[in-house]
Image (spheres, rainbow, N blue to C red):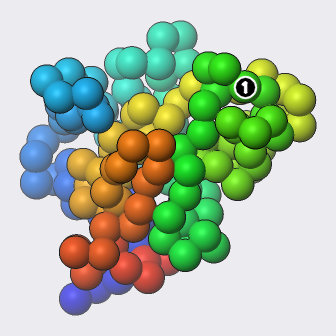
Amino acid sequence: MEDLGVIGLIKKRFAETGNPAQILMAKRGRTFSAKLADDGIYVDNLGDQPFLTWAVFTESLLLLEKMNGKVIKGNAMNFRLGELGLQVDSLEGHIAHKVYQKDLGDSVFRRITPVAGILVWAEICASEPGELKLDIKNSKAQKKKC
């Protein structure tokens, strides 16, 4: 089987389910809409910043691989980048620092809900309270390169 990488796996899932797709949030019964674009994904639950570039997802996978398949999600609602609840090695903190060039001490725009939701929906990760893990039950989620 071809090694699709994180972007290929997300695009494949859109091909299977349709575009736009309704993606289940961690809270049962709630969904958000995601629409595939050439350079990323538009979501309807991020207000006036609805676009997630592919770099968000490639950096997410790089961090997951670096952290042996398990990362803390991070809390941008209550902490600034670098504080205990939003460390640079949390998924939210890593994305803010690497993709959006935020510095330690900066406030961070919360994107974790759609990012985690898309990674789970694409069967790349599993979501657990406060953390995200590579989905070890699904062989296509293992060792995929960006």
Q: Position of residue 110 (x, y in %)?
A: 58, 25
Q: Tell me which residue sits at (50%, 35%) in the image.
A: 112
Q: Residue furthest top?
A: 48
- 4 vs 90, left or right, is left
* Count of numbered badges drawn on the protein: 1
Q: Position of residue 66 (x, y in %)?
A: 63, 73
Q: Position of residue 4 (x, y in %)?
A: 34, 74
On screen, 33 above or below 129? above
On screen, 2 above or below 99? below
In this view, the residue in front, 4 or 78, is 78
**Among the 4 quarters of the image, the one containing residue 99:** top right
Q: Quadrant of the N terminus?
A: bottom left
- 64 vs 20, left or right, is right
- 31 vs 96, left or right, is left
Res. 135 in view: yes
Q: Tell me which residue sits at (47%, 43%) in the image.
A: 130
Q: Residue furthest bottom?
A: 1
Graded by Cα atoms within 10 Å as few (under 14), some (14 to 19) or many (20 or more), the crowding at tag 1 reads some
In this view, the residue in front, 70 or 58, is 70
Q: Amino acid at mark 1?
A: Phe
Q: Which structural element holds mark 1?
A: loop
**Among the 4 quarters of the image, the one containing residue 123:** bottom left
Q: Position of residue 30 (x, y in %)?
A: 20, 22
Q: Which residue is mark 1?
A: 79
Res. 109 in view: no
On screen, 18 above or below 70? above
- 99 vs 116, left or right, is right
